[in-house]
Amino acid sequence: MRHVLHSADEATVRKVMEHVTAPGVWLKSFVPPETLEPWLAPGWHLAGGIGYLMTASVPTAHAQAPAETPDGYVLSTWTRASVTRALVRTADGAFAARGQVAVTGLGAVVDQVETDPAHQRRGLGRLVMRSLTAAAAEQGATAGVLGATAEGRALYETMGWRTLAPLTGAMRGPDPSDT
C-alpha cells in the first residue's frame, strides 16, 4: 500500500503513520528528504532514494522522432483497460527494459520504467518512454506525470519532461541498510 500526500506537514505525516502497523507500507510526499526524515515515527525509514515529480505535455513528448529498436532487441506493447505496457527483451527472450502508462481522461501517469543494468546506455529507456507517450497521445492524453529517480531524471529532461517537486518516500518496517 502507498499513501501519497500531495501536501505534507508534520501533523499529517504523523497521523498517517500512527494508523499504519503493517510492514512494507509506503508514504510518499513532495518534500525533500531532510524535511520528511525528522517527522518519521519509530519503525519508519526513508526509502527509495532521491526522487522527483515530473510532468510533460504528452503531445510535445510524443512529437519527437520515434526511437528505433536497437539490433538484438524486441519491443512489445499491449493495452488493457487504459494501461499500456512496453516490454523490451533480448533476441533470446531475456528482460532488458519495461514501463507502463495509465491514461485517465486527459492525464497520463508513467510508472515502473526500468532498464536492466546489463542493457543500459543502449537507448532502451528512450524507446520505452517514446512508446508509452505515443500510446498516451493516441488515447487522448495531453499531460503526463511521473516519479523519477535521480538517474531517470536526466533521461526524462532530455525528452521534454520538467521537474515540479522533490518526491521522498518512507517505508514502514525494518531498514534493509541496518542488516
Image (spheres, grey):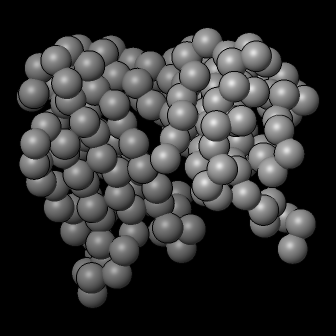
Residue 150 in view: no
The percent coordinates of residue 37 (x first, y second) are 85, 33
Q: Residue 93's quadrant in the figure?
A: bottom left
**Nearest to the observer: residue 77 or residue 109:** 109
Rendered residue at 54%/34% (across/down) = 3
Vertically, is 147 above or below 59?
below
Give left or right: position of 123 versus 88.
Answer: right
Q: Does residue 73 appear anywhere in the picture?
A: yes
Task: Look at 51% across and 23% down and name the residue there.
Answer: 54
List x then y, in percent, for residue 114: 46, 55
Residue at 44%, 19% in the rendered image: 55
Task: Tally the numbered discs.
Answer: 0
Residue occupying image coordinates x 34% and y 51%: 99
Quarter of the picture containing the C terminus is bottom right
**Most foreground residue, 14 or 3:** 14
| Left or right placement of residue 29 versus residue 65 in this view | right
The vertical placement of 74 against 80, above or below, is below
Q: Is residue 66 above or below residue 80?
A: above
